[in-house]
Amino acid sequence: MSNKVDPNLMKELSEFGLKDAYKCYHCGNCTAVCPLSTPENQFPRKFVRYMQLGQRDKILTSPEPWLCYYCGTCSDVCPRGAEPGETMMVARRWLTSQYDWTGFARKFYTSEKFEIMAITVVAVLVGIGLLIFNTGNPNWDHAHLNSVWPSDKIELADLGMAAILSFLLLSNVFRCYKVVMGDMATKIPLRVYGSQLKELIIHVLTQKRFGKCEDRMQWFVHLMIMTGYSSVFLLVVVLINGLTFENLKFQRDLPEYALWHPIRLVGYYATFAIMYGTTYAIIGRLRKSKSVYKYSHPTDWMFLILLQLTTMTGIFIHFTRLLDWPFPTYALYVIHMMVAVPMLVLEVPFAKWAHLAYRPFVIFLLKVKEQYAKEQAAVKVPSVALAD
Amino acid sequence: MAKAVTQSILVVGGGMTGLSAAIEAAEAGHEVFLVEKNPYLGGRVAQLHHYFPKLCPPSCGLEINFRRIKNNPRLHIFTMAEVEKVSGQEGNWDVSIKVTPRYVNEKCTGCNKCSEACAMEIDNPFNYGMDKIKAAYLPHDMAFPMRYVLDPALVKSPEAQKVKDACPYGAIDLDMAPATLDLKVGAIIWATGWKPYDASKLDTYGFGQYPNVITNVMMERLAAYNGPTQGKILRPSDGKEPQTIGFIQCAGSRDENHLPFCSTICCLASMKQATYVREQYPDAKVIIFFIDIRAMDRLEDFYQKVKEDQNVQFFKGKVAKIEQDEATKGLILRVEDTTSMTLHEVPVDLVVLATGMQPNTSETQIPAAVQYDDYGFVASLAPRPGIFAAGCTRTPLAVSESVQDGTAAALKAIQSVLRR
């Protein structure tokens, strides 16, 4: 098999935030110190090498960037200050742009201007949409969101958005599947995929691999953001209209749920978890408190800022509703949506958020490969015995 | 130009560089004062088993120099002494020297009676604390000057009188006080050398925590006949013969988090130590973990020779982490073979960390304004008129290069005091 060398790869990657990879003198310290690096799937030095040698295809078909959680240990011990951890992060950004067939992700990562523009355009569209499409008869006596934007209509919009998002993300995931599996894609029977589904779910829920990193604080913070985000997703997408059950509805006007009602508790947990996680990360990035926070790409900031703004406007709405102030509630609702929708529509399929699909999925694919190899080995053993 | 008030020369540091400089200058007819911090001369070389290029024991090269010192009345030696103050200018330096009490005077014959009478023991600094010695001791068996030393802890203890009484020559003086000497010299040669980088700062290697992780300077002592094991290379944890020995190169060298520079000698030092092991244990296996092998000029031949040994493996990759097997006290090294891009866990019985040279001037600077480089080495051979830096004070050097550098500095100093 021939290897194509792309002499401009390092330059291209520098647009994705690559900085010091050229300093590497290949001692292998980073790979050997990494608690997640294994003989079968070792990183990060391999990727520094691939980048320096312009081995585009090798990076493209590699699963390892998704196995790294960027705990920063490799960068801490690097004798050259070549920032191997950041290099892996760059590999993930680049892969996200490569999996994406629309070309949007690439623009997103390489142009800050484009990123801001895209978010502004979507935000304005959402704002205009909410002002045009409403009941036209808001309740000005009480803060009743359903009187302006009824939850069943929002549910429809949610479903529409979810469909578009899923289509974009899943089509990219499929492309990821094809490059990572290569010719194995058609070889492995579906049954093997099925047998490893449990792993996929466990990884999504616990991110237990992250727990193997030396800095377990990062795992905790990440878990907080992830669970908070998932809870909110459950509330605003799945349960916005309560799946027709009146007392599971998230967007409900008075009477307010009791304080210990599960919907309220989940909402409070989510708010706390996201605020805790994002605040920790924002302070860390401002102070550059550890290797993982040393370099911040515009997309890193955008992700944290949008998430925190969404949560903050959500908190405000909660209070204005409780205080029964109609106008502030409706106005904040529009702002809330203007932040949340672009964040979801743009970041999930095209930017940092896409890792929520790629990471567990690639781990799943590796488990599938591993299982398949095990089964193949088991089949081979008796045939050897026969030959004897 | 001012006239040189005196043509005498001060040499600071009695290691290989300082000795060479002092002897050459004295033999050229100058009054020379040699100041050494330790109670003996010879510095780091005295602590080696064998040294390059001829792989002779230090007794060989040092003995000749000590003979030259004895024959030269113009050379004055101050041991256990440090330079405290330097003022003045080229040709006219005022220097004050602080002398720490040895508690033993020149009447000492080296009869060992005081040591026999002494019960108190201290960590042996000459063997990097790997064994104990009596608190009334001869620093090592070919110490020059051949004179015992009393540890301050012993002098303060009630045992002191007993030790004093044991001396048949009246050589022990318990009331000896720190003294300050003021000298006037024409030129100063600074050759305070280096110290091994503190391996306990390499926190993934477990030095100080795992008994079988030692440094290259400790390995020299293990191999030396007058070392803690009388020259047998044995594991510190159980005194057993090691079957597999791992050498970790660049342990704290070429590393931005530690010493960012290359000490140039550690590659050859490890290869040399590999030959010690191979001579003692014909079946033992040696693995040298390296990033790049730096065998300077003629020493390439030595590298080729060591490479031919089937039992010496050169493994390209920096060891990232050492873990200890609690039962056997064996060590497991996690390392990537960077040539094949494969991750390994290599078990060995003994680990030798090839730590680099940290210039002593990075901690104790010359008490006169001179320029240093980023790592604490004096920036040039002649950093200022009348002051000369030589040997490992200037740059990491091997023994033979230190001799050359010391001689060069002597010549510079002589020119400095004569040209006025």
Image (cartoon, helix red, strand yellow):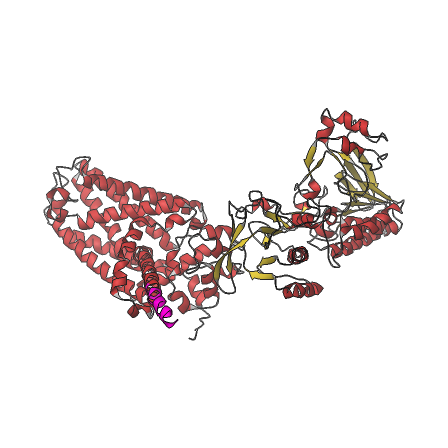
Q: Looking at the picture, how far across and down is residue B48, in whole percent?
A: 72, 50
> Where A260 sits versus A43, above or below?
above
Q: Give whichever of B100, B307 is nearer the camera.
A: B307
Q: Quadrant of the N terminus of chain A?
A: bottom left
Decide if residue A64 is on the left or right side of residue B38.
Answer: left
Residue A380 is covered by the magenta coloring:
yes
> Where A12 sits versus A136, above or below?
below
Q: Is residue B387 visible?
A: no
Q: Quadrant of the C terminus of chain A?
A: bottom left
Q: Looking at the picture, how far across and down is residue B21, in whole percent?
A: 80, 50
The residue shown at (68%, 57%) is B279
Q: Is residue A204 visible?
A: yes
Looking at the rendered structure, the number of numbered marks drawn on it comes to 0
Decide if residue B210 is on the left or right side of residue B220.
Answer: left
Decide if residue B126 is on the left or right side of residue B20.
Answer: left
Quarter holding residue B237: top right
Q: Looking at the picture, how far across and down is residue A213, in whole percent?
A: 41, 49
Quarter holding residue B140: top right
> Where A272 sits versus A387, above or below?
above
Decide if residue A119 is on the left or right side of residue B408.
Answer: left
Please give the range of residues in magenta: A375-388
Residue A34 is covered by the magenta coloring:
no
Q: Looking at the picture, how far across and down is residue B373, in whole percent?
A: 65, 51
In the current view of this chain or complex, which residue is farthest to the bottom?
Answer: A2
> Magenta region, mostly helix, strand or loop?
helix
